[in-house]
């Protein structure tokens, strides 16, 4: 079976919105590009060993990394990571590439929020992170013929005839309540871990403490994403989808 034949006919004409796993691959590739650039600059600076050259090189690398995403996204539709994972950043208003200023805004919001920008992705109709929603953009499959079903979703429909979705305010309140609960849960776990492991010194943490902190952060992120997704779809206890009356 050819790769093209795995794309459903309806999806071939409708926009295909990238799943988080696909977007994560693109981000990972861009991380590698960033690390290679920094390592190369440090190697050149240490080889030349001239302060003025090293300073100029440092400024050039910082500028290049700061402009890397905005320039490539606005002019080519994506970074190197986007291109290698068959993705494209699309402007909702035009259906084309986002403008340079909007690309800068996406980067700033994403940089400020970090991974927390992605916690809402499964609850949105078009797999959008917070920086996508704010800038009215989406990340789509660039070439549908090269895509596999597990790499994308089509636009989600919130309600069906056979079910009654709880009101939005009910879902939002439930989501907020569950988010508070999971935050308190992770905070209690962090306090217990600090008591058992001795916490961190002024400027350093034991390797075990760092691993525990990383695990707790991942638990919090995954938990938040799951709560938002399930709550918005009416699948949390207290705000479950009901059956429509006949």
Image: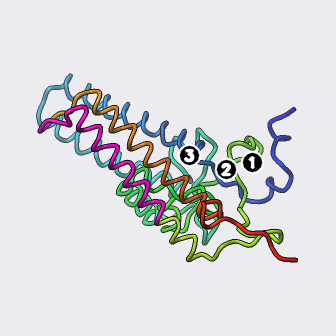
Question: Which color mode does the image show?
Answer: rainbow
Mark 1, Cα crowd under 10 Å, few <14 / some 14-19 / many 20+, is many
- Identify residue for label 2: 141
Toward the viewer: 30 or 67? Answer: 30
User: How far apart are the two marked residues, 3 and 2, measured between alpha carbons?
Assistant: 10 Å
Question: What's the magenta bit mostly, secondary-structure-wise?
Answer: helix
The region drawn magenta spans 177-203
On the picture, is 91 further left or further right than 157?
left
Quadrant placement of the N terminus = top right
- Identify residue for label 1: 144
On the picture, is 77 further left or further right than 199?
right
What's the residue at 27%, 44% (across, down)?
191
On the picture, is 34 further left or further right than 166?
left
Asked whether 193 falls inside the magenta stretch, the response is yes
Tell me which numbered mark, 3 or 2, is placed earlier along the sequence: 3
- Which mark, by number, is residue 23? 3
Choose mark 1 or mark 3, whichever is in front. Answer: 3
Mark 2, Cα crowd under 10 Å, few <14 / some 14-19 / many 20+, is many
Q: Position of residue 19 (x, y in %)?
A: 62, 48
User: How far apart are the two marked residues, 2 and 1, measured between alpha carbons?
Assistant: 6 Å
């Amino acid at each position: 079976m050819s790769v093209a034949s795995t794309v459903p006919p309806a999806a071939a004409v409708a926009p295909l919105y990238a799943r988080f796993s696909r977007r994560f691959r693109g981000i990972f590739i861009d991380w590698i590009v960033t690390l290679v650039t920094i390592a190369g600059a440090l190697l050149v600076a240490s080889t030349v060993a001239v302060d003025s050259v090293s300073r100029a090189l440092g400024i050039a690398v910082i500028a290049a990394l700061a402009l890397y995403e905005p320039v490539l996204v606005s002019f080519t539709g994506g970074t190197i990571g986007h291109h290698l994972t068959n993705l494209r950043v699309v402007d909702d208003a035009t259906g084309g590439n986002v403008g340079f200023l909007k690309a800068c805004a996406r980067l700033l919001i994403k940089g400020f929020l970090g991974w927390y920008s992605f916690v809402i992705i499964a609850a949105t109709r078009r797999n959008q992170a917070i920086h996508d929603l704010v800038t009215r953009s989406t990340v789509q499959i660039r070439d549908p013929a090269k895509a596999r079903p597990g790499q994308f979703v089509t636009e989600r429909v919130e309600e069906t005839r056979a079910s009654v979705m709880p009101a939005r305010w009910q879902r939002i309140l439930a989501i907020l309540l569950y988010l508070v609960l999971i935050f308190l849960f992770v905070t209690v776990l962090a306090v217990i871990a600090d008591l058992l492991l001795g916490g961190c010194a002024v400027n350093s943490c034991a390797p075990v403490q760092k691993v525990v902190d990383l695990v707790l952060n991942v638990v919090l992120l995954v938990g938040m994403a799951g709560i938002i997704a399930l709550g918005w779809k009416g699948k949390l206890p207290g705000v479950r989808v009901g059956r429509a009356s006949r």
